Image: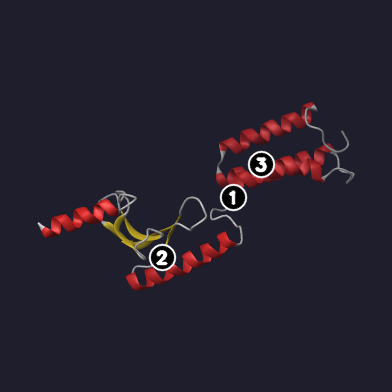
Amino acid sequence: MVLLSFFLHLLSKKKHPMAKYELNQLDVKKDEIIVLYQRPRKDSSIIPTWQMRISVPNSTGYKRVSTGEREQPEVIRKAINTYEKLYMKVLSAEALQSKSFKDVYNKWMVDLPKLLVGKNRTKDYSTERISTVGNFSLKFFKDLRLMISKRRLLHSIESGEMRTPQS
């Protein structure tokens, strides 16, 4: 009976219920900032490598990543080091999550024509650059939405809806 009440007490204190993909959870500092866990395989066995879920104060979301380790003392050390690095990133106003290639590429597509103003480049120059980078990224990332965005941009350049240098 005492054991049951102890487990009920632990469960009532948790802010995030243990997800079915977070097995053997270990809350390193008992504050849910650094949570270590293992993931199940499809056959319900447990993958021995530990994962970490880190939340940094004054930031949104979590950073989820593998520790690459199997031994608990090493897992804890690595997780604390990762937390400290992420905390320093947040203090220096950097984002926890890096931008996706798609986001960077879309921003670059918009900014490229502006960067070429006054550089004596033709409309074909920016179209060629967008096509070259877009084709590489599409093969590499297989992102259909990026291809559609590229086509729309190329169409707007070719139809004259978007002004480029020399047009």
Q: Where is residue 26 in the image (x, y as percent from the top left)?
A: 32, 62
- Identified by mark 3, the residue type is Asn
> In the rendered view, does 135 fall on the left or right side of 120?
left
Q: Is residue 59 toward the left or the right of residue 71 in the image?
A: right
What's the residue at 34%, 50% (across, down)? 16
Residue, x 65% and y 47% (percent of image)? 104
Quadrant location, the C terminus? top right
Q: Residue at 76% across / 38% down in the picture? A: 127
The mark lying in front, picked from 1 and 2, is 1
Mark 3, residue position = 106
Q: Earlier in the sequence, mark 1 or mark 2?
A: 2
Q: Which of marks 3 and 2 is nearer the N terminus?
A: 2
Residue occupying the point 67% across, 32% down: 151
Give the Cα separation between the discs numbered 1 and 3: 11 Å
**For the residue labelled by badge 1, is the local secondary structure a helix, a strand or a loop?**
loop
Q: Distance between the residues labelled 1 and 2?
A: 23 Å
Q: What type is the residue that disc 1 sits on? A: Lys
Question: Which quadrant of the view contains residue 147?
Answer: top right
- Looking at the image, residue 135 lies above or below residue 161: below
> Does 19 sit left or right of 147 as displayed?
left
Q: Where is residue 30 in the image (x, y as percent from the top left)?
A: 34, 63
Q: Mark 1 points at which residue?
A: 99
State the separation of the CA atoms marked 3 and 2.
Answer: 33 Å
Q: Which mark is residue 68?
A: 2
